[in-house]
Image: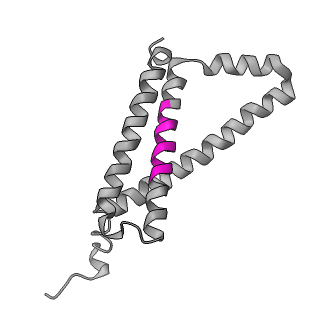
Amino acid sequence: MQGKSAKDGDAGAGLWKGLGMWSWVLFRISGIVLVLYLVAHLWVISQGRIGGPQSLDTIFEALHTPLLVLLDLMLVAAVLYHALNGVRIILMDVGVGVHRHKAIFWVCMVLAAVALAAFAYRASSFILG
């Protein structure tokens, strides 16, 4: 038997490995999360125009729960990942660090983790109540 064909069900099996593929997938997921957040944010802000200040105050009180502050923490993680990975991609596009793209990826991730830890420390008083 020679090699396996696409009919054997192994087509693309090797695609889901490697740092580049996972950084690409996470970049797309974080982009979708940010677009969904933008839509939700615009809806909340529009409620202030439609319902007046009392309506907006009611929404803000509902959003000031530990669970939603934790979701804000996850939003910050998505923003940091998307922004720093975007910078990495721009660097690759202009030819800077092409041969060290994995090292640059990990530097960006360490920077994101440090910034997220600082944000989490600051937000911990809100998350824990």
For the point 28% across and 62% down, the residue is 18
For the point 36% across and 57% down, the residue is 22
* In the image, farthest residue toward the left: 1
Residue 82, magenta (yes or no): yes
| Image vertical order of residue 99 relative to residue 117, above or below | below
Q: Is residue 22 left or right of residue 76?
A: left
For the point 32% across and 68% down, the residue is 15
- What span is in magenta? 73-84
In front here: 95 or 39? 95
Q: Main secondary structure of the magenta part?
A: helix
Whole-percent x, y for residue 21 in the image: 36, 62
Quadrant of the rendering where the N terminus is positioned = bottom left
Whole-percent x, y for residue 5 in the image: 27, 83
Q: Quadrant of residue 118?
A: top left
For the point 48% across and 56% down, the residue is 87
* In the image, farthest residue toward the bottom: 2
Whole-percent x, y for residue 127 in the image: 47, 18
Whole-percent x, y for residue 29 in the image: 48, 51
Residue 11, magenta (yes or no): no
Q: Quadrant of residue 59?
A: top right
